[in-house]
Amino acid sequence: MSNSNSNEEGEMSNYYSNEEALDDGPDSFRKVVRQRISDRTKKVVKTREILSKQAVQTKAIISKQAIKIAKRAEEHERFINKVTHLLGVLGFGGFCFLLGARPQDIPYVYCLFYVTFVPLRWIYYRFKKWHYYLLDFCYYANTIFLVMLLFYPRNEKFFMVCFSFAEGPLAWALIVWRCSLVFSSVDKIVSVLIHLLPGIVFFTIRWWDPATFEAMHPEGKASSRVSWPYVEDWSFLCIWLFVVPLVAYTLWQLLYFLIVNVLRRQRLLRDPEVMTSYRELSKKARKANNIWWRLSGLLGDQNRMLMYILFQAVFTVATLALTVPIFLSYEMHVAFQILKVSASVWNGGSFLLEVMPRQVVQKEKRKLEMKPIPAQPDQSTVDALADNCNQADVNQTEVS
């Protein structure tokens, strides 16, 4: 009641002040209006400041919790790796069974995987200062896949764009960047599935889903559709499998450059430990001094980023073009799935037999280096202890 009365009194006072201002003249009325606008502006500014402070505090709390979770995971790394290997093998077997028994449910498995593991990956990458990896094209494309599968599952044009992304840049990145299927590593499993699962999802929708299969082979009709989605002509195929995906890729590239190289440039310069895809690839190429490092330096060191963008654009154009024959041929699409799985398993075996032993040795060396060296006693202390022992022996001899 008191609040309502005070509000009413405030409104009445404003009403009478406005009436008095009108009586005094238009100039005084303008002053009152300006004052009220100024007061409201100040309130809005204060509200924004409070909200911004709360957002900063919330972000700091989330970051601290992410760091705590990641540290605890590192403390129990061996046990977590064993559990991960067990669950990974069982999950892979269950996925293969589901792929054969109910292929129409594979898109829902993918959606569950993405909404579960990508936030967890952000927590882990935030601790490692790798969180800018989540701005890469693969996450951009996977987000588009999620929207398509949940909200537009029967939109044929949208399906073709997603198909082009999944069996184009994402699929070939699995092979070119040597993603490894290692069941004892959550990070490597998630990296492989982010690139491998979308292609399997769109393979099942195109060829094995009962709904699309029925659309391709309608009963009681002499002529059946050649495929789902229905391809009207070559121009339709090229537009939705190549041109539109290329425009969507260009939009991502512009956004990525704006965020990483403009808006967050100073942040990255202040902390060289914060990793991006370009930093990691350039670091590895410089260390190996391979052909990619030499080619990226053709225009000088200051233009290596531009050359990296150019190489990635060429890679994307080439892989998008290869999706056209894969889209039209069931046999070629099956062979491509086998190639992707085989490459990731082969790379996983190479990692287990060649890379992991070296990593274990390096970790053990770091642990030994971090252990404190026991303090050695001074020579004077050692001499004093020796004298005391000798004197004790002499006393014992005299007593005997």
Image (tube, helix red, strand yellow):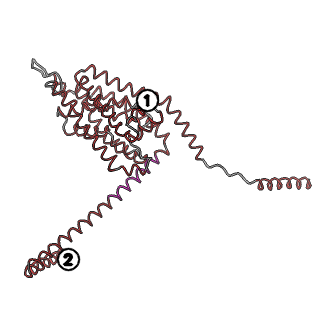
The amino acid on which the numbered mark 1 sits, given as a three-letter code, is: Gly
Residue 328: horizontal and vertical position, in percent?
22, 22
Region in magenta = 55-72
Check if residue 60 falls in the magenta segment: yes
Instruction: Give me the residue at 18% from left, 23% from top.
Output: 227
Residue 155 position in % (x across, y down): 17, 34
Q: Is residue 125 within the magenta segment?
A: no
* Marker disc for residue 172: none
* Nearer-the-camera pick, 207 or 44: 44
Q: Position of residue 110 (x, y in %)?
A: 29, 35
Which residue is the extreme one toward the top? 222
Up/down of 347 relative to 2, above or below? above
N-term-proximal mark, 2 vs 1: 2
Residue placed at 19% from the left, 40% from the top? 151
Task: Name the foreground residue: 262 vs 52.
Answer: 262
Question: Quick one: SS at disc 2?
Answer: helix
What secondary structure is the stretch in magenta mostly built from? Answer: helix
As drawn, the label of residue 2 is 2
Q: Nearer the viewer, residue 257 or 376?
A: 257
Residue shown at the point (81%, 53%) measured from the top left: 386
From the viewer's perspective, tell me whether residue 202 is left or right of residue 69. left
Quadrant (top left, top right, bottom left, bottom right) of the N terminus? bottom left
Residue that numbered label 1 is attached to? 348
Numbered disc 1: secondary structure? helix
Label 1 environment density (alpha carbons within 10 Å; few <14, some 14–19, many ≥20)? many
Give the distance between the C-alpha atoms of the residues marked 2 and 1, in whole angstroms: 71 Å
